Image: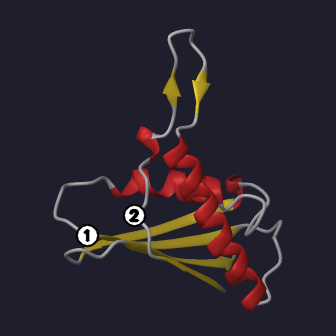
């Protein structure tokens, strides 16, 4: 089992890609920074917990903490985090066979906790 915890606001997948007037798609810098943060937190967790990038199927559990009571869709949080963990925790996010999630609210506190288990 691998445990990854972060203290940043989780970005929603639907807000990730932008299109220019010329029709080109690009990632906003906020998205690039969030993905880099998730990758660095995951790399540290993998090193501390002796986890190697796996090729096996995995069970992915995530708890997201929102710092305000705005309504948010939990499933949008999964996509941005799952993409960021590719190549560090697992080779491809298609290896995720089970997903479990929950969300909670704590005024002024943002973050996430991820547990990855090999099936």
Residue 72 position in % (x across, y down)? 27, 54
* First in sequence: mark 1 vs mark 2: 2
Residue ID at (23%, 78%): 106
The quadrant in which residue 9 appears is bottom left
10 Å crowding of disc 2: few (<14), some (14-19), many (20+) = some
10 Å crowding of disc 1: few (<14), some (14-19), many (20+) = some
Residue ID at (54%, 43%): 29
Up/down of 112 relative to 10, above or below: below
- The residue lying toward the viewer, choosing from 117 and 36, is 36
Quarter the N terminus occupies = bottom right
Q: Is 45 on the left or on the right of 102, as rendered?
A: right
Badge count = 2
**Helix, strand or loop under label 1:** loop
Q: Is 45 on the left or on the right of 52, as rendered?
A: left
Residue ID at (34%, 71%): 110
Residue 3 position in % (x across, y down)? 59, 84
Q: Is 95 on the left or on the right of 16, as rendered?
A: right
Q: Contact, CB < 8 Å: mark 1 with mark 2?
A: yes
Query: Hey, which residue is sitting farthest left in the picture?
Result: 69
Query: Hey, which residue is sitting farthest top in the picture?
Result: 22
Q: Distance of mark 1 from mark 2, alpha carbons?
A: 8 Å
Residue 119 position in % (x across, y down)? 69, 76
Residue ID at (49%, 57%): 78
Q: Which mark is residue 67?
A: 1
Residue 32 position in % (x across, y down)? 59, 48
**Helix, strand or loop under label 2:** loop
Up/down of 20 relative to 66, above or below: above
Give the residue number, with chain letter if any, for mark 2: 9
| Color encoding of the figure | secondary structure
Up/down of 66 relative to 94, above or below: below
The quadrant in which residue 49 appears is bottom right
């Amino acid at each position: 089992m691998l445990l990854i915890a972060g203290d940043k606001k989780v970005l929603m997948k639907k807000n990730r890609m932008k299109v220019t007037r010329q029709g080109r798609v690009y990632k906003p810098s906020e998205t690039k920074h969030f993905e880099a943060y998730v990758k660095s937190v995951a790399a540290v967790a993998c090193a501390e917990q002796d986890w190697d990038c796996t090729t096996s199927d995995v069970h992915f559990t995530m708890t997201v903490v929102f710092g305000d009571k705005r309504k948010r869709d939990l499933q949008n949080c999964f996509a941005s985090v799952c993409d960021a963990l590719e190549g560090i925790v697992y080779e491809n996010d298609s290896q995720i066979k089970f997903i479990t999630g929950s969300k909670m609210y704590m005024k002024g506190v943002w973050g996430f906790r991820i547990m990855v288990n090999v099936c």
